[in-house]
Image (tube, rainbow, N blue to C red):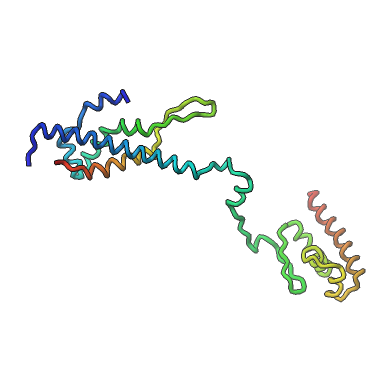
């Protein structure tokens, strides 16, 4: 079907306005979309620290901490300095430290578990603390 | 919009329109080229730097989106 030159001219005009309309409408859609999104979007810098904290989680791996076992309990120590210092202690002293500071037991309870007098536990505990202090301060000085 | 007035008067040749509507890639490219200026004008945004000086820059994402839309619509155009 051949079109007359005036028909062609009409189609050329139609096409032109069609294309412009398409672009104009799409542009308007984009602007509207952006405005709608703006209601829900917020810049990271405008978030309160509490809200920011909710946005991430730190993975915890068992390999990140050193494990000590005492009386069947598994105690995880995260800090490297503390765990090496603990490893340097004798087994009995380490057990007392772990039981009292990591498992929150009283000297009395520890004494009952380890078949010791409360007073001995207390003595061992304080002397181990002194020893630990020396070890940790020695590390810190390096 | 005044600077596009001159473009308004220039129309694409009829054969190009027909071929573009039929999916001819070269013809579609010619149509895109023809409306390049209008698309760029629509996707130009005025941004302000930290001193408050205005900068004009083309939003590439918007430009691509307008282009894509035009291509899909060209193919839907019915030539008589």
At a point 63% along the width and 61% down the height, the residue shown is A61
Left or right of A68 on screen, residue B76: left
**x%, y% of residue A76?**
71, 64
Quarter of the image with the N terminus of chain B is top left
Q: Residue furthest bottom?
A: A115
Q: Specify the quadrant of the image occupied by residue B56.
A: top left
User: x, y (%) of residue A57?
Assistant: 60, 55
The residue closer to the viewer here, A43 or A87, is A43
Q: Position of residue A66 (x, y in %)?
A: 70, 63
Residue B25, percent across and down? 22, 42
The residue lying at 87 percent from left, 58 percent from top is A130
Q: Residue at x 11, y 31 (%)?
A: A6
Quarter of the image where the C terminus of chain B is located = top left
Front-most of residues A76 and B66: B66
Tell me: residue A36, above or below residue A127. above
Q: Quadrant of residue A78?
A: bottom right
Q: Is residue B72 visible?
A: yes
Look at the image and tell me whether residue A90 can be seen. no
| The residue positioned farthest toward the right in the image shown | A119
């Amino acid at each position: 079907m051949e079109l007359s030159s005036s028909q062609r001219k009409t189609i050329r005009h139609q096409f032109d306005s069609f294309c412009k309309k398409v672009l104009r409408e799409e542009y308007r859609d984009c602007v509207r979309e952006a405005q709608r999104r703006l209601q829900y979007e917020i810049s990271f810098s405008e978030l309160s620290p509490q809200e920011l904290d909710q946005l991430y989680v730190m993975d915890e791996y068992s390999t990140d901490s050193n494990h000590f076992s005492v009386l069947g309990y598994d105690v995880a120590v995260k800090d490297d300095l503390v765990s090496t210092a603990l490893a340097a202690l004798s087994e009995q002293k380490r057990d007392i430290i772990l039981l009292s500071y990591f498992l929150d037991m009283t000297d009395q309870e520890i004494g009952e578990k380890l078949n010791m007098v409360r007073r001995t536990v207390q003595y061992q505990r304080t002397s181990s603390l002194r020893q630990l202090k020396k070890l940790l301060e020695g590390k810190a000085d390096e | 919009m005044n600077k596009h007035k001159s473009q308004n008067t220039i129309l694409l040749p009829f054969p190009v329109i027909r071929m573009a509507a039929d999916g001819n890639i070269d013809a579609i490219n010619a149509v895109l080229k023809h409306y390049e200026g209008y698309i760029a004008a629509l996707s130009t945004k005025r941004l302000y730097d930290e001193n408050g000086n205005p900068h004009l820059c083309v939003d590439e994402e918007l430009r691509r989106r307008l282009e894509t839309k035009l291509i899909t619509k060209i193919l839907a155009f019915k030539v008589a």
